């Protein structure tokens, strides 16, 4: 490999894409095309980066499988940055097998990290955690150690675990400093802000106060019954009853938690759960049915008892009931949480990450656009969505988790 290619590669590793382009911008051989693609990705021109990487992969000969695999891996990273989650992960898995077969540990680790990041974007926190635990990167370059630590930080955030998140952040900060890549250090510092911002609101005995992630972790560790409005569940320590897919039941549970230790009136429960402005006998009959279903879901955690005026929530072992409300109240909070990463998302990618239909996502985006909380870029199939910047709260507990709690 010639000296210009070697120097361009070193510049990219150091986070200097302009320095790399100075050396290979006018060349069209496969290695130069690949380096130009990576440089354009670092500069944010993702469409141009993807085109260059695909040209490079096609140009490498049949005996250059490792070089082609590196192009595929770089293209997969560009796809993640562009929030293109619909593409099959098979190509990246094939590239990983190629790296493993040829003993390319560094690029194999990079490919595994990309697979884990994709799992996180799709809300598969448990799978991402298992794959992350299997990584051994102590001997790899500092930039990969930092990337791995950031993945661990994100997993801890999704699980509401403040102390593991702090540990991951400290490792990421130290590794980023060793790498000498300013952009990586800036990414770590930006991620760390989530630990300082309010992540939820605690509603207890009629009072409301904001909580950081560390304080939320303390609430989860307490012996109280916690009605988790961020994940739509009831929990006491390790016991969790998820109502994420039972919106009517969670609306009843939240209303009961807000009224605790008092009772919630029947008509108020009907208005909250069924959006009925004039409760009638049919609504009251339906309320009895739904309360029965709620009792069944909460059987190990609490009882719902009838009172002369309505219903009251009675925890089985906990001394108190505490409601953990989202930092921002919105029926489309999960969409906002995904868009808050600052990247432009397509409707299809949002639907994949949320586990819902594109039509549902389109309705949510329409409502958010009308409220001035999101904006669209482009038209047709190339349309992407961005959140209007909103400061003051963290979104980690609002992000979707596939299959329940991670």
Image (spheres, helix red, strand yellow):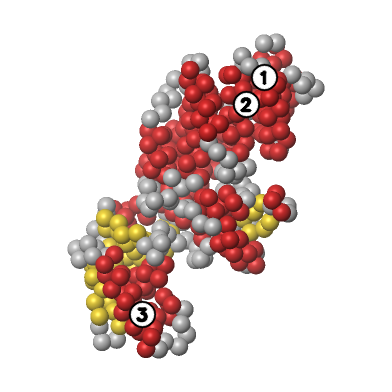
Q: What is the crowding at mark 1: few (fewer than 14 residues within 10 Å), some, or many (at least 20)?
A: some
In front: label 2 or label 1: 1
* Outermost residue toward the top in this view: 2
* Residue drawn at 41 percent across, 28 percent down: 135
Residue 77, picture quadrant:
top right
Spot occupied by residue 39 in the image (x, y as percentages of width and height): 68, 29
Whether 336 is drawn above or below 254: the answer is above
To which residue does mark 2 refer?
71
Q: Tell me residue 79's x, y (percent).
A: 61, 38
Q: Earlier in the sequence, mark 2 or mark 3?
A: 2
Q: Residue at x 63, y 42 (%)?
A: 82
**Image quarter hosting the N terminus:** top right
Q: Residue 180 at what x, y percent from top left?
A: 57, 26
The residue indicated by pointer 3 is: 286
Question: Which of the two labelled residues, at mark 2 and mark 1, occupies the earlier sequence position?
Answer: 1
Residue 60: assigned label? 1
Q: Residue at x 61, y 54 (%)?
A: 347
CA distance for labels 3 and 1: 66 Å
Q: CA distance from mark 2 to mark 3?
A: 58 Å
* Mark 2–mark 1 CB contact (< 8 Å): yes
Compared with 294, 399 (above or below) is: above
> Disc 2 to disc 1, how far (Cα)?
10 Å
Q: Is residue 153 left or right of residue 238?
A: right
Q: Nearer the viewer, residue 112 or 281?
A: 281
């Amino acid at each position: 490999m010639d000296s210009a290619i070697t120097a361009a590669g070193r510049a990219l590793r150091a986070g200097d894409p302009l320095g790399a382009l100075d050396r290979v911008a006018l060349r069209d051989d496969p290695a130069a095309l690949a380096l130009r693609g990576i440089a354009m990705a670092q500069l944010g021109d993702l469409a141009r980066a993807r085109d260059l990487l695909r040209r490079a992969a096609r140009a490498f000969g049949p005996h250059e499988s490792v070089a082609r695999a590196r192009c595929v891996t770089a293209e997969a990273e560009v796809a993640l940055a562009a929030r293109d989650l619909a593409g099959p992960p098979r190509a990246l898995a094939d590239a990983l097998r190629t790296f493993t077969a040829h003993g390319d540990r560094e690029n194999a680790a990079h490919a595994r990290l990309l697979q884990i990041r994709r799992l996180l974007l799709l809300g598969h926190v448990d799978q991402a955690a298992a794959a992350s635990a299997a990584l051994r990167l102590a001997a790899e370059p500092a930039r990969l150690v930092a990337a791995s630590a950031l993945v661990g930080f994100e997993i801890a955030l999704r699980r509401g675990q403040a102390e593991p998140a702090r540990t991951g952040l400290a490792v990421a900060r130290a590794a980023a400093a060793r790498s000498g890549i300013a952009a990586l250090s800036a990414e770590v510092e930006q991620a760390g802000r989530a630990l300082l911002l309010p992540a939820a609101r605690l509603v207890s005995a009629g009072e409301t106060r904001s909580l950081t992630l560390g304080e939320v972790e303390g609430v989860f560790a307490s012996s109280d019954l916690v009605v988790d409005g961020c994940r739509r569940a009831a929990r006491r320590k390790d016991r969790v009853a998820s109502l994420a897919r039972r919106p009517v039941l969670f609306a009843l549970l939240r209303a009961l938690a807000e009224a605790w230790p008092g009772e919630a009136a029947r008509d108020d429960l009907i208005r909250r759960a069924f959006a009925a402005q004039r409760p009638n006998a049919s609504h009251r009959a339906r309320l009895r049915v739904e309360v029965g279903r709620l009792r069944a879901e909460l059987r190990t955690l609490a009882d719902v008892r009838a009172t002369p005026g309505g219903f009251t929530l009675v925890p089985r072992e906990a001394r108190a009931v505490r409601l953990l409300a989202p930092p921002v109240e919105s029926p489309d909070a999960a969409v906002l949480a995904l868009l808050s990463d600052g990247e432009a998302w397509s409707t299809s990618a949002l639907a994949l990450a949320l586990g819902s239909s594109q039509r549902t996502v389109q309705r949510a985006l329409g409502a958010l656009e009308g409220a001035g909380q999101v904006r669209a870029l482009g038209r047709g199939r190339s349309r992407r969505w961005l959140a209007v910047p909103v400061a003051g709260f963290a979104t980690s507990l609002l992000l979707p988790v596939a299959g329940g709690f991670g």
